[in-house]
Image (cartoon, rainbow, N blue to C red):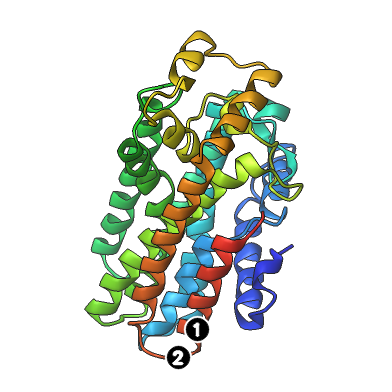
Amino acid sequence: MINSLWSQIPELNQQLEQVQGIILKQIKPLNDPVASLIKQQITSGGKMLRPACLLLFSKFGPHQDKNQKLQAAAAMEVLHLATLIHDDVIDDSDLRRNVPTIQVQLGDRNAIYAGDYLLTVYFDLISQVANHQSEIIFNARGIKKILRGELDQLQINRNVEATVKMYLREIAGKTAQLIELSAQFGAILAQADKHIIHKARFIGHNLGMAFQIQDDVLDYLGSSKLGKPKLEDLKNGVYTLPLIYTLCQENSQLPQFLKQHPQLNDSQIQDVAQIVKEQGGLTAAQSLAQKYTNKALGLIRELPQNQYRRYLEQITKELLQRQQ
């Protein structure tokens, strides 16, 4: 099932269905129950934002190899899925995309191996589509930045002295880097002009920053469509921007409270969430997400005027306004 976000762009929706088919083919060698559980994650309606970005930016250059860009798009989604599986182990998450996580069903060890397997699939696909060794190196460096962002999160979790700067550095690697990589690699494969490849990088970065901040806001607001329990980050000690903004306020008593209660119970989680809302943490985070969205839109409007630029504008706006 492809997320309804893409139903308004039939051409892209069809391509994402093909990307999903490529990914499903890659996990066939695995035995059940691992294969079935990975398939469940693939088909559970994830947004597929990374492959969509690659496919859209691949339209801004003269080289149009359909199979090459579909495989490259599949590689980006596989890499994303691998990081999610590993994240679920680290965060001890029960749900992902409204289905039980692999780690909760098969244990941490098997989930880690499943994520590692997907990383090998990613490199296999990239090695097939890359035109030059430099493109493989480009992808490898992208992964280093992603993993650095994941490690940066360790400096923030349950840290009442976490700063906005620390958070932005973390999500720049953990989330924005893969969207940036996808957009840029799409333009590279299309042999786009250098200035378009350059813009793709910064559009992807700003889009990724806005996307993650909005995700962190939605964790507080809650939605039946989020695919994970409300306030799961707070429950797991994952400090995100709404909370960090509140912690940084002058005379805030929240840091002392969290120091005294490093493991929050359900009632305390609700209390902290209410404080974050009342003291403007959500509003401040939403405002920053809007700023990153505006930066992305400004750069998108500098791209050649065609239907794919319009698609990028449309999707960028909708991602900020989404409720899931």
Q: Secondary structure at mark 1?
A: helix
Residue at 70 percent across and 40 percent down: it is 31
Task: Residue 4: give its label.
Answer: none
Q: Is residue 42 left or right of residue 199?
A: right
Identify the amino acid type marked 1: Arg
Residue at 51 percent across and 36 percent down: it is 279
- Residue that carries the numbered disc 1 in the rendered image: 310
The image quarter containing residue 129 is bottom left
Tag count in the figure? 2
Residue farthest to the front?
251
Q: CA distance from mark 2 to mark 1?
A: 7 Å
Residue at 36 percent across and 46 percent down: it is 173
Residue at 35 percent across and 38 percent down: it is 164
Q: Is residue 314 visible?
A: yes
Query: Percent position (x, y) of residue 306?
Result: 45, 91
Q: Dot 1: within a 10 Å radius of its alpha carbon, few (fewer than 14), some, or many (20 or more) residues?
A: some
Q: Is residue 213 left or right of residue 37?
A: left
Q: Secondary structure at mark 2?
A: loop
Q: Nearer the viewer, residue 275 or 46?
A: 275
Q: Is residue 145 left or right of residue 287?
A: left
Query: Percent position (x, y) of residue 310?
Result: 50, 83
Q: Answer yes or no: do the residues labelled 2 and 1 have beta carbons within 8 Å? A: yes
* Quadrant housing the N terminus: bottom right
- Residue that carries the numbered disc 2 in the rendered image: 306
Judge whether 122 appears above or below 33 on screen.
below
The image quarter containing residue 198 is bottom left
Query: Percent position (x, y) of residue 271?
Result: 64, 24
Q: Nearer the viewer, residue 107 or 171?
A: 171
Q: Dot 2: within a 10 Å radius of its alpha carbon, few (fewer than 14), some, or many (20 or more) residues?
A: few
Identify the amino acid type marked 2: Asn
Q: Is residue 130 visible?
A: no
